[in-house]
Image (cartoon, rainbow, N blue to C red):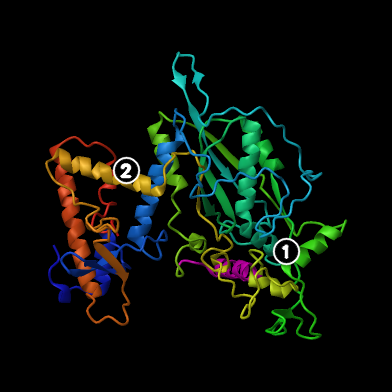
């Protein structure tokens, strides 16, 4: 155990915290027990999913996703779900091909498919989510599933290091627009695949970056669909973006539209004419019979398809590890740390980030001012290049949405449910060895007194204006000591009796802060 704070350097203590799975940037909250009047400052894990911010929290989040992926991949039973329940990961349900996305007042355009996109058949739908079974020559029954990888098209030839062979001809605009709207093409793919597969295809997918920094999708898919059908669906899938044109800016440099407080809208900096509102700009598109979409997103020709049996534990484990390998890394970390990036890679990253920063990501994006359109919900203070969406920053490079996409009936559980399952494994293991686990709800906000008022009150802590806060050294030392003690208890309990479940959940469960 650690006891001498002054003798441990901050970087060494940080390394010890990371090695023992202790959050290195906890959120402090003051807990007051209204029964006893006792107050204490409790460090709550930050919950970051990025290794650059907090390695222990990112590793816990990744392991939780691995469990979620494994539990749903080769299910052989149907999951009862409430159709009205909103899935936390937003599974797509829209069936109209060319509806305009992200609009407050949704406009519906013709559902006629593009002439350059092949038609896909609709097959009768079966009310099932599990895959079909096959009987082998040995009489054994198999229920295989799939591992898919989808990519975006080429924007120009790239070398082994992922950088363009000719940066002048490389299409950075298309690369940036495809990255910004990658979730839309993924939604379309699943919609089309379900229509052609004839059942409610369920998936666990992660979004990562290729060496060239373009996003691609790895997906564990329940059941098998003919390889040619999957290829046909990928080739026929597209998403049309019916937005005002955003390929050439109208305003550059410091000559930008100005906000008129009296009119409550942006005006041209030269002649004072009001900029068209978002709705007016869309109406203009609808009135033009020769209008074309601002952008069309399509999938690339590279598609990887692997069939995997649920009984092949080694292949399943390897696939899940590959599927979640880079979840804790940002897109910009694809080339490694700053000292590992070569000069061509740094130039490529900067060029793509510059494109992503100045393109509009949504109807309310302030970058629309560069293209002569007033953003939806415009207000004073909007400036191009300063949209708050994380899609524009260097770490995300256009991918402002979720990195993990899970269909509604994958496991029928939320992440909180999976976290509780892991805690239960720990509790059962300790109980089998005669060890009591800490009460994870002992400080819960739901615990009340006889009069119905909450017993425990939680308040945020201002680190800058609170002199009674424990030092960072003290917090880290206490957390490391607790973690070492819990791990020791758990390891001894495993040796003393049978393990009821996944042992990897032991060090991922933090009973001191679960209630918070």
Q: What percent of the width, then of the height, locates residue 296?
A: 73, 54
Indicate which disc residue 421 carries: 2
Residue 332 sits above or below residue 116 on the image:
below
Residue at coordinates 37% horizontally, 60% vertically from top-left?
Answer: 47
Report the magenta residues as a range. 340-358
**Left or right placement of residue 156 versus residue 55 in this view:** right
For mark 2, give the secondary structure.
Answer: helix
Q: Main secondary structure of the magenta part?
A: helix
1 or 2: mark nearer the eye: 2
For mark 1, give the secondary structure.
Answer: loop
The single residue placed furthest to the front in the displayed view is 451
Residue at coordinates 61% horizontally, 48% vertically from top-left?
Answer: 186
Q: What percent of the width, then of the height, locates residue 443?
A: 24, 58
**Residue neighbourhood size for the residue with mark 1, other residues' Cα within 10 Å, grouped as few (<14), some (14–19), many (≥20):** few
In the rendered image, the quadrant that contains the C terminus is: bottom left
Quarter where residue 425 is shown: top left
Residue 369 sits above or below residue 66 on the image:
below
Q: CA distance from mark 1 to mark 2?
A: 52 Å
**Residue 245 shows in the view:** no
**Left or right placement of residue 484 versus residue 22 in this view:** left
The single residue placed furthest to the right in the displayed view is 289
Residue 344: say if magenta. Answer: yes
Q: What percent of the width, then of the height, locates residue 233?
A: 67, 38
**Residue neighbourhood size for the residue with mark 2, other residues' Cα within 10 Å, grouped as few (<14), some (14–19), many (≥20):** some
Residue 100: say if magenta. Answer: no
Give 409 or 390, whichever is nearer the viewer.
Answer: 409
Quarter where residue 288 is shown: bottom right
Residue at coordinates 64% horizontally, 63% vertically from top-left?
Answer: 362
Residue at coordinates 22% horizontally, 37% vertically from top-left?
Answer: 499
Give 157 or 136, whichever is nearer the viewer.
Answer: 136
Q: What percent of the width, then of the height, locates residue 416?
A: 37, 49
- From the image, tell me which residue sits under label 1: 169
């Amino acid at each position: 155990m650690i006891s001498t704070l002054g003798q441990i350097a901050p970087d060494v203590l940080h390394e010890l915290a990371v090695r023992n799975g202790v959050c290195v940037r906890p959120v402090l909250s003051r807990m007051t027990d209204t029964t006893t009047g006792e107050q204490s400052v409790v460090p709550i894990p930050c919950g970051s999913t990025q290794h650059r911010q907090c390695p222990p929290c990112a590793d816990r989040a990744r392991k939780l996703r691995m469990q979620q992926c494994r539990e749903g991949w080769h299910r052989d039973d149907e999951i009862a779900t409430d159709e009205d329940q909103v899935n936390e990961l937003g599974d797509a349900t829209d069936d109209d091909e060319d509806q305009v996305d992200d609009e407050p007042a949704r406009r519906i355009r013709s559902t006629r498919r593009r002439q350059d996109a092949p038609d896909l058949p609709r097959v009768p739908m079966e009310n099932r989510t599990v895959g079909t079974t096959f009987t082998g020559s040995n009489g054994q029954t198999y229920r295989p599933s799939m591992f898919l990888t989808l990519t975006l098209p080429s924007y120009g030839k790239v070398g082994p290091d992922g950088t363009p062979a000719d940066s002048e001809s490389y299409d950075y605009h298309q690369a940036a627009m495809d990255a910004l709207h990658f979730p839309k093409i993924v939604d379309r793919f699943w919609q089309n695949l379900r229509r052609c597969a004839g059942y409610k295809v369920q998936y666990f997918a992660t979004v990562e970056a290729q060496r060239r920094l373009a996003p691609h999708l790895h997906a564990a898919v329940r059941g098998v669909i003919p390889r040619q059908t999957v290829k046909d669906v990928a080739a026929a899938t597209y998403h049309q973006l019916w937005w005002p044109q955003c390929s050439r800016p109208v305003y550059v440099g410091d000559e930008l539209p100005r906000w008129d407080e009296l009119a409550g809208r942006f005006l041209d900096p030269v002649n004072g004419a009001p900029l068209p509102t978002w709705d007016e700009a869309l109406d203009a598109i609808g009135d033009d019979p020769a209008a074309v979409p601002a952008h069309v997103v399509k999938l690339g020709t590279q598609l990887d398809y692997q069939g995997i049996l649920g009984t092949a534990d080694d292949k399943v484990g390897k696939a899940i590890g590959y599927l979640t390998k880079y979840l804790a890394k940002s897109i910009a970390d694809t080339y490694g740390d700053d000292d590992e990036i070569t000069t061509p890679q740094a130039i490529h990253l900067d060029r793509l980030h510059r494109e992503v920063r100045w393109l509009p990501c949504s109807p309310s994006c302030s970058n629309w001012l560069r293209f002569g359109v007033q953003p939806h919900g415009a207000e004073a203070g909007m400036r191009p290049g300063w949209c708050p969406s994380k899609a524009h920053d260097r770490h995300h490079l256009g991918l402002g949405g979720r990195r993990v996409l899970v269909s509604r009936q994958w496991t029928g559980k939320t992440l909180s449910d999976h976290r509780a399952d892991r805690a239960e494994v720990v509790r059962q293991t300790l109980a089998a060895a005669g060890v009591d686990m800490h009460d994870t709800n002992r400080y819960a906000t739901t615990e009340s007194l006889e009069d119905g008022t909450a017993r425990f009150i939680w308040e945020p802590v201002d680190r800058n204006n609170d002199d009674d806060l424990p030092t960072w050294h003290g917090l880290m030392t206490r957390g490391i000591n607790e973690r070492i003690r819990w791990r020791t208890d758990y390891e001894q309990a495993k040796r003393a009796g049978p393990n009821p479940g996944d042992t990897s959940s032991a060090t991922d469960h933090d009973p001191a802060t679960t209630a918070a």
